[in-house]
Image (spheres, rainbow, N blue to C red):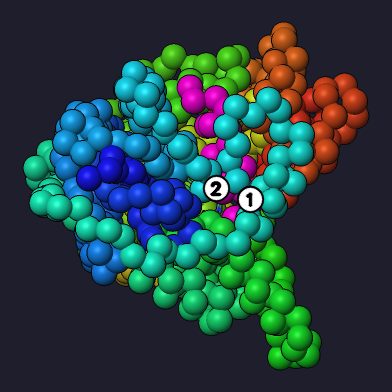
Amino acid sequence: MEPVQVVWFKRDLRLVDHQPLLQASLRGPVLPLVVVEPQLWQQADASARQWAFCAESLEELRMGLARLGQPLVVRVGSVEEVLERARRRFGIAGLWSHEETGNGWTYDRDRRVARWARSHGIPWIEIPQFGVIRRLKNRNGWARRWEEQMAVPICPAPDALQPLPEIEPGDLTTAAALQLADDPCPGRQHGGREQGLLLLESFLHQRGARYHRELSSPTTAIRSCSRLSSHLAWGTVSMREVVQASRQRRAALQQLGASERGEWLRALRGFEERLHWHCHFIQKLESQPDLEFRELHPLTIDARPADHERLAAWAEGRTGLPFVDACMRSLIATGWINFRMRAMLMSVASHHLQLPWRESGLRLARLFLDYEPGIHWSQCQMQSGTTGINTIRIYNPIKQGQDHDPRGDFLLRWLSELRTVPVVHLHEPWTMDPETQRRVGCVLGMHYPLPIVDPTEAAREARKRLWDRRRQEGFRELADGIQQKHGSRRSGLPPSGAGRHRRSRSGETGAGAGAIQLWLDLDGC
Ligand SMILES: Cc1cc2nc3c(=O)[nH]c(=O)nc-3n(C[C@H](O)[C@H](O)[C@H](O)COP(=O)(O)OP(=O)(O)OC[C@H]3O[C@@H](n4cnc5c(N)ncnc54)[C@H](O)[C@@H]3O)c2cc1C
């Protein structure tokens, strides 16, 4: 038998718009391979909920490949060892995969695999699946290249795959075998492409009509946002498929009269802008892998140790700040929360509670079904004020609750212990006097925690600390370098000293005097 083309599935669990699979299938017999790596699943950012979603997606992929003629081959262990066994048994003519911008562990593993492939003279063909560019020198022209990537026609699944003789498909393992901690998540999404396509369809034709208006409140966002993030993170649908489907829908809407199409065009433009941000943020990690571990701006490094009690109170939804606790409990139960609430959770952890961003970031990573290292760590740093180039927002958790859940519908769903508290006190139960607390049967410190910090005082202190950092000598010059490397060119940012900066729509801004002014403007958000 001629040597096989190995297609290594990573976070691209689909058959359609899978160039490595299609290209490999045109060149000879294909070994479609998934390696479940116990070491990867033991990393501090992995969780059983993520495995459950991944395993469901793998089951569906396995059935799809079986229909083509060669079922998915699953092996548990290290990739190099699995590949080496395949090489000895079949001979490998080529290794095919998508490019991955993963965490530090996958980065090191890929380097080992590249060394192994080189040492055996096996070509490893990695094909981009997002608009993320390898070995990018700077961000000039990035947006244009993203557009080019997204415009590439969607490639179909291969018509058929030649069956490999006598190859055991192998069993999918379990969360327990991967030594993942128990992680109940009753409201989580189900994995698999079928679910992903259903979400895409319902978002583009029904749920998304008021996306731009309803994405900020956790009560409405759960329905009005696309909810595609986990599917994009595990690759059950491709970014290109989503971008092209949204554009096609917009083109169809443009044929309709204004009253018929309502606000759909605005909604979908906002959505597509966020699809662009997806790759914009992942590019940062691709260009600077250590941002997962280290502050982007060296003058924001804070060597405080973790406060385990505070961290646990925040991570378990018992800070005594009701809206923060409700968001956290909702996230624990569903594996998802909307962008604004993620930003608020991170901001409260880093600013009000003064927790190290890496520790709280890891807690969130494990809770997110859609954990995507490039977006996640860039956002964690951005919300913690450690990038040096972004508008810093110290979210006021009480105002967020009053603005986005004024009647407390969302809050009460997750904090039933506050159900007897009058609406006027819901977001600040400590404003109830002791007599009212007794009368309504919700005594703070007994039925619900007292706030672990005074939110106003904590925000004031955090603001001062941020200012002190930004005033350090050399801060701006370093920030200019970071802006050059990572900043969005859409914001049109000149280097420091070149005048007031405009804020881009992704919330990115330069670090010069104008940015600090702007940061002040937004301080009360
Ligand atoms: C601290 C923090 C951590 C985050 N971690 C992750 C993560 O691990 N994985 C993840 O996918 N998103 C992350 N986000 C971004 C964002 O919150 C989610 O992408 C979004 O809430 C997912 O819901 P959706 O699919 O319904 O999004 P929609 O609003 O429907 O947007 C569609 C897609 O656009 C992308 N997108 C949307 N908002 C953003 C954004 N602000 N930045 C980058 N891409 C965006 C996502 O791929 C999303 O699926 C994080 C945000 C914050 C503040």
| Foreground of the two, 479 or 301 | 479
Magenta span covers which residues? 274-290
Observer-nearest residue: 263 or 191?
191
Residue that label 2 marks: 130
Q: Is residue 354 above or below residue 37?
A: above
- Horizontal side, residue 379 vs residue 507: left or right: left
Gap in angstroms between the C-alphas marked 1 and 2: 7 Å
The answer to whether residue 289 is magenta is yes
Q: Determine which of the numbered discs, if any, sits on residue 149 in the image.
A: 1
x%, y% of residue 333?
28, 59
Q: Place residue 314 in its image quadrant.
A: top left
Residue drawn at (33%, 44%) of the image: 5
Does the beta carbon at disc 2 come under 8 Å from ligand 1? no
User: Is residue 112 visible to the viewer in this orientation of the structure?
Assistant: no
In depth, the one of 521 and 293 nearer the eye is 293
Give residue 270's mark.
none
The residue depicted at 72 percent of the width and 50 percent of the height is 505
Q: Nearer the viewer, mark 1 or mark 2?
A: 1
Residue 459 magenta-highlighted: no
